[in-house]
Structure formats: structure tokens, C-alpha cells
């Protein structure tokens, strides 16, 4: 049976180095990760076991700022690989990650005490003993990613732990953790297949939203397969949906098997004082919710719908992990009434609404402001890296409240201070697109990517959804300018002949020159604009 193992542990305790030593694959794929030397997003690699089985391995960030990504990666795993530095021992994120694993019901795994080569024998023995005390149910193995010490023992320990793991059968459900588009393939979504099976030709439903999509192809760790089973890391190429219409937290499910809901009834497990509002981590989503308590049970009133099933595990966070539990009803009726909520244009419950005073000012609580800030921060976490902003609130109170949020307003959007767009994991996609560019316009379906690359001088957009290389654009402009300096006017036919190209290409370029203020159209001819002639 396919299984997935996920790392856990404090930052700089050697998770990614250990994964690289076990699998031969570097899971830090983002330029910022390699530059800073820390994991920021989830990484994936296949892990071969001594008995011939293959596990899917998920490497998660260890920094406290990226706990949301850690929980998203831990969702759906069958085994944990808890990593503890031999010299430092258990640290704050070690304990929080371990608490998250327990809240998610992940009971089987192995503890790796790393950097064994960097400490003396007594220190290593003490570190192993402390790890056994911290996680008594797991085998503890001392390893060194640098020398290879203990790696074979660790693989064997994981193989033994994998024997005890099991999955219940249920209709197909895959929580999306990455979405991107590839030239010639289209939209691709990745995630751990939580239940069911998926193969080419299958029709799934993207929730929330209720959009039917068809699976074009399926890959497991970069290998094309005809069927992927529950427990495997999969990448599905989809038709019927654009990249911008999917995001981390969405679910691809068997039609009519699951329904998104703004409310879920749960049984709680508390780690500390449980606040009336918290961030609910379910699947790969993180959603603000109001917690309506009924003893050890509660109803979670969610800011955005989740695709839950009975028995699902979830985590509650409010600055730190405060609890979690299991779902007992994924779509219950509304229980005890609560005070009024404001709803966005999409119908999402946001926060308690501010009240306008007689003098026109707005009154709101500090708690409400923190909820709004947390809601926007969650949206910013999920924003497109190409344009990492979110729509600014347009409610009547917005002008008074936005300056208090600590965000930058740029036009109609809000950004984290100093943030700017970046390609991140789409660099390879951008490079592949650039490789196709020349003098003949190439269709680019992703207008946001095209605009990003054009802003950085890597392509020039012409017409509606087409692009040429900057060199081709400059060459065509030089030919146009030379002809206009000689003859003062130029027709489409003459320009086409100068470039020895098609009528469509010549037309698209001339229209772009008009837009750029180089030429203006006079009847069937173009003339040089005065401002362009004086440059």
C-alpha cells in the first residue's frame, strides 16, 4: 500500500540535508530557499526502502513563521520522521510539530537524531535518550547526513514503522498544496491523494466552487502512471480549469461525494486556553473561524468553506498551536445563535462588523482588528507570488482601518511592506516560455505571468495573449524607424515585406508600436509620432 512520510522538527536541525542524504534529491527548489539556507515551502522526494517499497517523502519548513506550510504538508501523511539536532536537543518547533502530529492522529514514525558526527559520544548518547523520552512510541536512530552514519538503520526503521500504517477506504479526495501551469500541458495541481484513486480521463470536482475538471494525465514523482492510489504524492494535469482558479487549500474530489461547508461540528482536544476565534488548519487550508463551545464539543463557524468528512483531523492555532481534534459532522445545522457577521462579496464570513458612530467615525474592537489582520495575512500567504497582494477592503470603514493594518496600499491592493513579485517555483516555466520566443508571436495563456516577465524585460506582449522576444521587438522597431525616417509613411504591406513575415505578425507589431507611442495610424498608413521622432 502506498504511504507518505513527512518530516518535522525545529529549523536548522537538518531535515532537508537528511532528506537529500536519504533520497539523493534536494527538496529546496526555490531560489530564496537556497539563498537563505532554510526551507520555506514544501518539498517532495521518493524514498526507496530496503524491502523494495517506495514511500513518498514530504519535507516541511521548520521556522515558526511557516507552521501553516508544515501543517499543510503533514495533512495526509502516514508516518512522521521527527528530526532533532544532537547538539541542541528538542527546541520550540520540535515540541509544536510533535503536538501537531498528535493532533492530526499521526501515531507512527521514527525519530532521527541528526549531526551525530558533530558531537562526542556522551552528548550523542544523552540526545538519543532524551529523544526516546520525548517520543517513547518511536524508534530513535542517530544519523549523520554528512558521513552517512545510521542512514541504512533509519531506512530499516521507517520500513518497520510503515508496516503498522493503514488507510481507510473512501471516495477520491486530494487536497491541493501546489498549482502551476506548464507550456503545452496547462494547469497542474499537486497534493497527497488522501483517499480513492485517480487516473487519466477521470472527472473530479474542484471544491469549493463546484467546478468539474477532467484529469488529462497523472504523475507520481515525475513518472507518468495510469492509476495513482491513496497515499501517493501525485501531480494531475487538468482541463476545464485555469491556474488562477485553483489554490492551496482547495480539494479535488469525486463528484457528489463531498460538499463544502461553512460549519463543522468537532470534538476538541485542547493544548491550552482555547480562544473564541482561531485559525483552523484542515487539509491544506487555513481558515479563520469562530469557536462556539459546548463542553468538549464545538461548532466551528468558518470564514471560508472547507471540504471535510467525518473523522477528519484538524489543528487550531492562535499565534501558536492551541488545540485541534476530529470532525464529527462535516455539514451540521447552525447551533446556538451568534452575534452578526459581515460577509464579503464572495459570501465568506469575515469578522464582526464595526459600528459607525454619530460623528461618522467607526468604532471597532482590538479583537476585531486582529481578526481582520489575521484574515488578510492568510490571504497574503496564499497570494500569487507574481503579484503578492490582495484586494483592499472596500467597506465604508476601510479608509479609517487600512492605515492601522501595517500593510502597504498600492492602488486597489494591499501588500506586505517592501514585498515584490517573484517567480519562485515558476522560474523553470518562465525559462521554458522564453525559449519558445522569437520573431513570430507565441500564445501565452497566463496573462499575469506574461505581464510579470514583460515588466522585467524578458518578453514583449503583442495583441491579445501573444508575445515575442525583446530582441525581435527591438529589431522590428529599428526596421520601422529606419523606413519612416526614409519615407515618412509606411503601410502594413510594406512593413510585412520589410520583416519577411506574416500579415498577422506585422499587424500585431504595428498595433504594439501604436500603443507604445511610436506611431499613429492615418488611414491605412502609419506615421512617426513627433515625440518618438525627437527621442
Image (tube, rainbow, N blue to C red):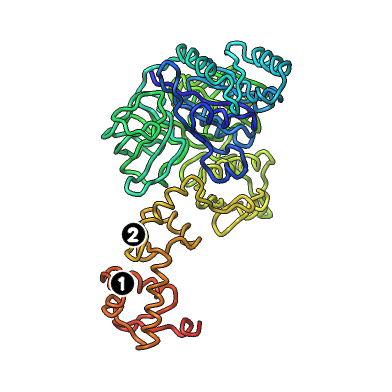
Q: Nearer the viewer, mark 2 or mark 1?
A: 2
Q: Is there a contact, CB below 8 Å, between mark 2 and mark 1?
A: no
Q: Residue at x 26, y 71 (%)?
A: 503
In the rendered image, the quadrant that contains the N terminus is top left
Instruction: Identify the residue at image location x=42%, y=35%.
Output: 190
From the image, tell me which residue sits under label 2: 442
**Residue 297's spot in the image, x, y percent?**
56, 19
Please indicate, yes or no, whether residue 263 appears anywhere in the rendered image.
Answer: no
**On the picture, is 306 further left or further right than 140?**
left
Most foreground residue, 411 or 99: 99
Q: Residue 249: give x, y in percent of width and height.
A: 47, 35
**Left or right: 479 with respect to 62?**
left
Displayed quadrant of residue 89: top right
Q: Note whether 370 is above or below 454 in the view shown.
A: above
Q: Position of residue 256 (x, y in %)?
A: 32, 29
Q: How far is the residue under mark 2 from the one under mark 1?
A: 14 Å
Which disc is residue 507 wearing?
A: 1
Q: Nearer the viewer, residue 382 or 354?
A: 382
Residue 263 in the image: above or below residue 417: above
Q: Secondary structure at mark 2?
A: strand
Amino acid at each position: 500500500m502506498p504511504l507518505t512520510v513527512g518530516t518535522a522538527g525545529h529549523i536548522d536541525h537538518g531535515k532537508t540535508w537528511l532528506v537529500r542524504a536519504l533520497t539523493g534529491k534536494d527538496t529546496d527548489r526555490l531560489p530564496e530557499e537556497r539563498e537563505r539556507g532554510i526551507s520555506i515551502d514544501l518539498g517532495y522526494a521518493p524514498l526507496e526502502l530496503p524491502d523494495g517499497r517506495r514511500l513518498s517523502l514530504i519535507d516541511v519548513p521548520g521556522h515558526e513563521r511557516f507552521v501553516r506550510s508544515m501543517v499543510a504538508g503533514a495533512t495526509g501523511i502516514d508516518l512522521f520522521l521527527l528530526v532533532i539536532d544532537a547538539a541542541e536537543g528538542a527546541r520550540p518547533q520540535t515540541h509544536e510539530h510533535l503536538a501537531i502530529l498528535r493532533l492530526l492522529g499521526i501515531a507512527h514514525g521514527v525519530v532521527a537524531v541528526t549531526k551525530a558526527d558533530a558531537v562526542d559520544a556522551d552528548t550523542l548518547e544523552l540526545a538519543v535518550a532524551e529523544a526516546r523520552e520525548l517520543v517513547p512510541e518511536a524508534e530513535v536512530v542517530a544519523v549523520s547526513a554528512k558521513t552517512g552514519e545510521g542512514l541504512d538503520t533509519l531506512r530499516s526503521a521507517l520500513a518497520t514503522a510503515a508496516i503498522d500504517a493503514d488507510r481507510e477506504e473512501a471516495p477520491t479526495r486530494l487536497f491541493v498544496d501546489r498549482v502551476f501551469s506548464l507550456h503545452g500541458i496547462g494547469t497542474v495541481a499537486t497534493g497527497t491523494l488522501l483517499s480513492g484513486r485517480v487516473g487519466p480521463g477521470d472527472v473530479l470536482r474542484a471544491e469549493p466552487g463546484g467546478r468539474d475538471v477532467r484529469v488529462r494525465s497523472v504523475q507520481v514523482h515525475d513518472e507518468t502512471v495510469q492509476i495513482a492510489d491513496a497515499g501517493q504524492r501525485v501531480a494531475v494535469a487538468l482541463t476545464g480549469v485555469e491556474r488562477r482558479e485553483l489554490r492551496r487549500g482547495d480539494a479535488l474530489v469525486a463528484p457528489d461525494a463531498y460538499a463544502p461547508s461553512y460549519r463543522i461540528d468537532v470534538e476538541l482536544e485542547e493544548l491550552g486556553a482555547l480562544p473564541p476565534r482561531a485559525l483552523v488548519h484542515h487539509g491544506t487550508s487555513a481558515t479563520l473561524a469562530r469557536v462556539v463551545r459546548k463542553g468538549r464539543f464545538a461548532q466551528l463557524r468558518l470564514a471560508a468553506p472547507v471540504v471535510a468528512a467525518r473523522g477528519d483531523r484538524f489543528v487550531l492555532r492562535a499565534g501558536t498551536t492551541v488545540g485541534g481534534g476530529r470532525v464529527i459532522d462535516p455539514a451540521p445545522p447552525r447551533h446556538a445563535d451568534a452575534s452578526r457577521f459581515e460577509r464579503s462579496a464572495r459570501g465568506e464570513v469575515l469578522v464582526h462588523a464595526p459600528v459607525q458612530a454619530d460623528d461618522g467615525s467607526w468604532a471597532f474592537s482590538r479583537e476585531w482588528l486582529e481578526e481582520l489582520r489575521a484574515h488578510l495575512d492568510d490571504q497574503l500567504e496564499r497570494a500569487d507570488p507574481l503579484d503578492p497582494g490582495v484586494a483592499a477592503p472596500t467597506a465604508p470603514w476601510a479608509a479609517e482601518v487600512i492605515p492601522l493594518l501595517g500593510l502597504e496600499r498600492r492602488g486597489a491592493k494591499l501588500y506586505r511592506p517592501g514585498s515584490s513579485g517573484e517567480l519562485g517555483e515558476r522560474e523553470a516555466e518562465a525559462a521554458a516560455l522564453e525559449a519558445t520566443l522569437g520573431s513570430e508571436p507565441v500564445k501565452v495563456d497566463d496573462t499575469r505571468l506574461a505581464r510579470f516577465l514583460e515588466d522585467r524585460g524578458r518578453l514583449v506582449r503583442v495583441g491579445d495573449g501573444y508575445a515575442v522576444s525583446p530582441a525581435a521587438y527591438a529589431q522590428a522597431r529599428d526596421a520601422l524607424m529606419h523606413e519612416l525616417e526614409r519615407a515618412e509613411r509606411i503601410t502594413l504591406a510594406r512593413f510585412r515585406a520589410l520583416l519577411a513575415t506574416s500579415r498577422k505578425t506585422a499587424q500585431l507589431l504595428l498595433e504594439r508600436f501604436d500603443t507604445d507611442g511610436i506611431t499613429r495610424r492615418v488611414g491605412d498608413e502609419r506615421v512617426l509620432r513627433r515625440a518618438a521622432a525627437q527621442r
